[in-house]
Amino acid sequence: MVASKTMNVKDAAKILVVSDARVRQMLADGTLTGEKFTERGWAIPVAAVRKLAKEREKSAKAKAKASGKPARERKAK
């Protein structure tokens, strides 16, 4: 069986640790690429989600390092 090269909004949201609505917003504003195939259905490239997740992780680590606190502690405020 060949692994799918795309995923849906729900799966992307789980990987990015955001809501489905936020993923749709990212798709609408171009932060995340995908192909809309129904009113709310999207085919989102797995590579695009992985790239964005990696960028977000890198950004969170940089912010934590700059503040001197782990990313989780900063978010808890």
Image (tube, rainbow, N blue to C red):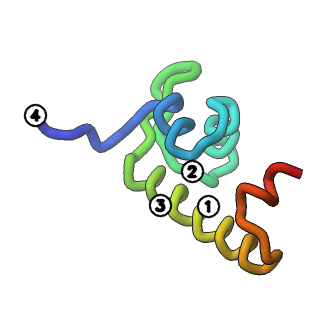
| Residue linked to disc 1 | 56
In this rendering, the answer to whether 72 lies above or below 36 is below
Q: Is residue 55 left or right of residue 63?
A: left
In this rendering, the answer to whether 44 lies above or below 72 is above
Amino acid tagged 1:
Arg
x and y percentages locating residue 51 in the rendered image: 47, 61
- Of the numbered discs 1 and 4, the one sitting upstream in the chain is 4
x and y percentages locating residue 39 in the rendered image: 57, 19
| Residue linked to disc 4 | 1
**CA distance separating discs 1 and 4:** 31 Å
Crowding at dot 3, Cα within 10 Å, few <14 / some 14-19 / many 20+, comes out as few
Q: Are marks 1 and 3 in contact (CB under 8 Å)?
A: no
x and y percentages locating residue 77 in the rendered image: 89, 51
Q: Are marks 4 and 3 in contact (CB under 8 Å)?
A: no
- Of the numbered discs 2 and 1, the one sitting upstream in the chain is 2
Kindly identify the residue that appears in the image at 65 percent across and 39 percent down. Answer: 18
Crowding at dot 2, Cα within 10 Å, few <14 / some 14-19 / many 20+, comes out as some
x and y percentages locating residue 38 in the rendered image: 50, 20
**CA distance separating discs 2 and 1:** 12 Å
- Of the numbered discs 1 and 3, the one sitting upstream in the chain is 3
The circle on residue 51 is 3
- Of the numbered discs 4 and 2, the one sitting upstream in the chain is 4
Amino acid tagged 4:
Met
- Of the numbered discs 4 and 3, the one sitting upstream in the chain is 4
Q: Are marks 3 and 2 in contact (CB under 8 Å)?
A: no
Instruction: From the image, state whether disc 2 or disc 1 is nearer to you.
Output: 1
